[in-house]
């Protein structure tokens, strides 16, 4: 999932204050607030009274727009001195029974039922709620989707952070773990999947064409880790090759895009590795994975029934190495959660970062040690995750890794690259600091002690500290409770070809001055012929502003020093002047691919900081990219060149230099695509499409689509064809709209429908833009959210600055209205895609004015506005640093 003008500093301070949350009050309010969210205070008060929870859930799923459920929940209650609430969202309640007594007029506000104190008793209670509810269509609760290819209906559940009450009545908070016994009546051709494997499937009495599924009670789980999925899914099964039976599910119409053998292989490798690493066997008996449509995120760790997003893990062509890696790493990430998250669970949502950070770190470690990606897993981690965390940690909206979460409304406020990748990086660093086996021992002890329970950050850190025999209090305070990224620089001098003095200098920005302890490796490099080789590596633990490194005195004077070799530390490595000059000239001569990756990132950091002109960076790309032989790094470098080109197109889409450099990238990418093979060819062709804009390139794309021209070795998959058509329509090529219609007639899939939206929305036509703006802004639209979200991110390509400007003021004016009327799922995407930032002084001022005028925006929306403002400032500064004219 970051220099600002003076008044922006005040804005940054205000948003951090507004989003920092408050500590839970020990005094519970007399009545729960009448809103859809649960506060930490109310949750703590409820869990102090309620324990030993067990649910019996009886669903009737017809495939129609609504479903029915009878929830029976049994629980121990400490006292009946006051009412108790049970969560249920927007349902039609038909019957409420409390301890055998029917309640004729339930006190229900569409968010929770209030159980009267008089109906409760100290000790064991039983509550039954019978209701009907519409299926969700936004990816939360019990989501329903109708496949446009064959009309079949599919459902699946998604509850994180707190959406289980959109499917059944419950205490929807992570520290009220429970067992779940499930019964489902569903169409006879459906398969039903839950946490446990069904114990019985029989004809439903009196209901022709329906089956009744019975599932035994689960082990105890937090509500958000329980799940239920049902539909006519295609099922693949492997009961022999692994220790635990494995199944894989997907829609029938997309089954040919699934390679079950690949899924089962990675899953088998991961289960064996985690069993061994944690020293605790997998606890849930079977391992089901479902590839589901319209999914909001990448995947979700429901115990024993993990869900994955179709948009990320279906392949209409042979998967690339990058796609295979992403699949392996996400399988490992969700698998790590089966122990850390499901078996041991956070007490409240402020612990969500640790849940995700740990899974990100352990998922990468498992990918590196158990799969074919031994040589690239950490390289992917750096380039795809950690680099984003560095960017986010330099923004005005940065935040500590551990932050208060006052209510479920704020649970996802800080779920971002800091949560996932900075958090994972701190754990990686802590493993180096303590030692690998000490870290492993501490994790094992934590899981043993808290299994089936809820735990806090102090419990986890305490287990590691005990295993290490050292106090981690200062480390925890510096790394987890203080925001911001430090910078380290090697400071050295040489005499007669030898190092005379060497120290590491650590610095921090004024707003976040914390200097941290960290263990890194220093790499000294020497030019040797056509190579730039690592001549010496030295591990160093540094702290404070200056750390002397006397061990390097007398070593050969290096051509380049990199102060975070092999990426042990979370720190911004600033190259000294000599090293920076060497890196720019000779980056392709560095044999170590991770180091080469990090040097490219150092250069890109300098671009974003205004220290390296964007045009000079592109010159470096044009010289060095064709020499790159590492697949992962090539994708990274070409991705950065694409970002650089998008900056230029936003700055000045019609400028002669913008067109000239785009043309140079086109020519480079096409020349390489013609000679490259396999995944490399697909990388280069993707770069060609990203740069395309000249008449020559647009004509070639059309010819490739028509078969009048071919690129030997390249298969034009359906997704690739749609990308090419969207490019043509985004440039208003005359026959582009006819191409959309013709392609739509051939591709009836739901992904095809989304591709149509993306292609149509990209057209540079004011009328098209206004039509889509109206649909996006209509919170009562009947269009599926997946289409609205696709339109948001397709509406204003970088080069359509003039069109973007036409509606910019109106969109900013509408922002507070939507922020109040639309939900957080909608606003996360809207704020990320639709806030206008067009790289001009006027645009920067407009965003600053909007932020000043709207201090009451919800936390996520306000943060997105401040980020857009800061990034627009950055773009203006990058434009000023150019050494070419854009006039």
Image (spheres, rainbow, N blue to C red):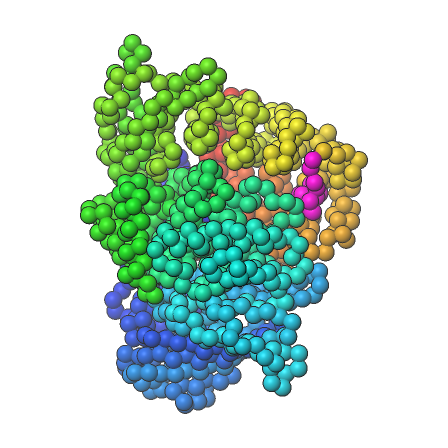
In the rendered image, the quadrant that contains the C terminus is: top right
Residue at the front extreme? 240
Q: Residue at x 60, y 45 (%)?
A: 319
Q: Residue 150: where, in percent of width, then height?
A: 71, 63
Give the prevailing secondary structure in the magenta stretch: helix
Q: Is residue 265 left or right of residue 84?
A: right
Q: Residue 468 in the image: x percent, y percent?
A: 23, 47
User: Can residue 247 be seen from the camera position used here?
Assistant: yes
Residue at 35%, 58% in the rendered image: 280
Q: Is residue 715 magenta?
A: yes
Q: Position of residue 264 (x, y in %)?
A: 54, 54
Does 23 appear above or below 658? below
Is 194 contained in the magenta span? no
Q: What's drawn in magenta, residue-wise?
A: 713-726
Q: Foreground residue, 836 or 297?
A: 297
Apparent side of residue 244 relative to residue 498 in the rendered image (left or right): right
- Residue 740 at what x, y percent from top left? 74, 48
| In this view, 104 is above or below 321 | below
Observer-nearest residue: 869 or 797? 797
Q: Residue at x 40, y 73 (%)?
A: 179
């Amino acid at each position: 999932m970051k220099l600002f003008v003076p008044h922006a500093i005040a804005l940054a301070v205000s948003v951090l204050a507004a989003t920092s949350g408050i500590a839970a009050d020990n005094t519970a309010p007399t009545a729960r607030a009448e809103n859809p969210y649960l506060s930490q205070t109310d949750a703590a008060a409820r869990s102090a009274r309620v324990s030993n929870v067990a649910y019996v859930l009886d669903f009737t799923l017809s495939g129609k727009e609504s479903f029915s459920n009878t929830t029976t929940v049994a629980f121990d209650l400490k006292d009946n001195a006051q009412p108790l609430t049970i969560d249920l969202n927007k349902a039609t309640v038909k019957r409420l029974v409390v301890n055998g007594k029917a309640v004729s007029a339930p006190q229900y506000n569409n968010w929770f039922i209030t159980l009267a104190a008089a109906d409760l008793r100290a000790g064991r209670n039983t509550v039954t709620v019978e209701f009907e509810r519409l299926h969700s269509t936004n990816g939360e609760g019990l989501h329903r989707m109708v496949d446009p290819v064959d009309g079949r209906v599919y459902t699946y559940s998604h509850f994180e952070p707190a959406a289980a009450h959109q499917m059944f009545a419950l205490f929807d908070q992570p520290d009220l773990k429970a067992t779940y016994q499930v019964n489902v009546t569903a169409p006879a051709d459906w398969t039903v999947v839950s946490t446990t494997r069904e114990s019985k499937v029989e004809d439903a009495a009196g209901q022709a064409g329906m089956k009744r599924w019975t599932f035994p009670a689960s082990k105890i789980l937090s509500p958000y880790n329980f799940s239920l999925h049902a539909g006519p899914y295609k099922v693949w099964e492997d009961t022999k090759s692994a220790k635990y039976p494995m199944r894989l599910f997907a829609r029938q119409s997309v089954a040919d895009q699934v390679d079950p053998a690949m899924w089962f292989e990675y899953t088998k490798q991961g289960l064996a590795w985690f069993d061994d690493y944690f020293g605790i066997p997998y606890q849930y008996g079977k391992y089901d994975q479902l590839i589901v449509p319209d999914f909001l995120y990448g995947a979700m760790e429901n115990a024993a029934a993990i869900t994955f997003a179709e948009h990320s893990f279906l392949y209409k062509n042979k998967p690339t190495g990058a796609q295979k890696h992403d699949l392996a790493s996400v399988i490992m990430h969700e698998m790590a959660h089966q122990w850390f998250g499901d078996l041991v669970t956070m007490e409240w949502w402020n612990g969500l970062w640790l849940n995700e950070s740990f899974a990100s770190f352990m998922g990468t470690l498992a990918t590196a040690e158990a799969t074919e990606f031994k040589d690239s897993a950490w390289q992917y981690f750096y380039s795809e995750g950690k680099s984003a965390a560095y960017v986010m940690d330099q923004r005005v909206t940065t935040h500590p890794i551990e932050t208060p979460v006052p209510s479920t409304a704020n649970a996802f406020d800080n779920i971002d690259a800091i949560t996932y990748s900075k958090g994972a990086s701190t754990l990686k660093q802590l493993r180096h600091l303590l030692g690998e086996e000490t870290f492993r021992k501490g994790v094992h002890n934590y899981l043993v002690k808290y299994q089936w329970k809820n735990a806090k950050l102090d419990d986890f850190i305490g287990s590691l500290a005990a295993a290490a025999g050292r106090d981690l209090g200062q480390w925890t305070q510096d790394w987890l409770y203080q925001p911001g990224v430090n910078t380290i620089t090697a400071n050295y001098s040489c005499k007669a070809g030898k190092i005379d003095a060497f120290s590491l200098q650590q610095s921090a920005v004024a707003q976040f001055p914390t200097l941290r302890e960290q263990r890194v490796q220093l790499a000294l490099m020497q030019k040797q012929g056509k190579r730039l080789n690592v001549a010496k590596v030295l591990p160093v633990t540094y702290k404070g502003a200056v750390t002397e490194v006397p061990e390097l005195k007398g070593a050969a004077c290096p051509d380049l020093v990199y102060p975070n070799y092999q990426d042990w530390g979370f720190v911004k490595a600033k190259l000294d002047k000599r090293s920076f000059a060497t890196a720019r000239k000779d980056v392709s001569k560095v044999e170590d691919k991770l180091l080469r990756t990090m040097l490219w990132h150092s250069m890109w950091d300098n671009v974003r900081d205004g220290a390296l002109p964007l045009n000079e960076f592109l010159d470096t790309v044009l010289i060095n990219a064709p020499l790159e032989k590492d697949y992962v790094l090539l994708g990274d470098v070409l991705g950065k060149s694409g970002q650089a080109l998008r900056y230029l197109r936003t700055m000045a889409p019609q400028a002669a230099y913008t067109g000239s450099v785009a043309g140079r990238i086109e020519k480079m990418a096409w020349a390489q695509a013609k000679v490259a093979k396999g995944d490399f060819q697909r990388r280069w062709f993707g770069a060609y499409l990203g740069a395309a804009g000249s008449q020559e390139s647009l004509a070639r794309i059309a010819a490739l689509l028509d078969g009048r021209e071919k690129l030997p070795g390249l298969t034009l998959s359906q997704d690739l064809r749609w990308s090419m058509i969207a490019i043509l329509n985004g440039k208003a090529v005359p026959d582009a709209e006819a191409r959309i219609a013709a392609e739509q007639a051939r591709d009836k899939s739901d992904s095809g429908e989304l591709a149509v939206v993306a292609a149509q929305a990209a057209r540079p036509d004011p009328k098209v833009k206004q039509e889509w703006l109206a649909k996006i802004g209509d919170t009562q639209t009947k269009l599926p959210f997946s289409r609205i979200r696709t339109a948001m991110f397709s509406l204003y390509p970088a080069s359509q600055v003039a069109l973007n400007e036409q509606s910019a003021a109106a969109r900013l004016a509408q922002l507070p209205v939507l922020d109040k009327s639309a939900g957080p799922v909608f606003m996360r995407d809207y704020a990320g895609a639709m806030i206008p930032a067009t790289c001009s002084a006027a645009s920067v001022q407009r965003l600053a004015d909007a932020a000043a005028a709207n201090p009451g925006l919800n936390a996520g929306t306000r943060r997105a506005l401040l980020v857009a403002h800061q990034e627009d400032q950055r773009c203006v500064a990058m434009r000023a640093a150019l050494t070419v004219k854009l006039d």
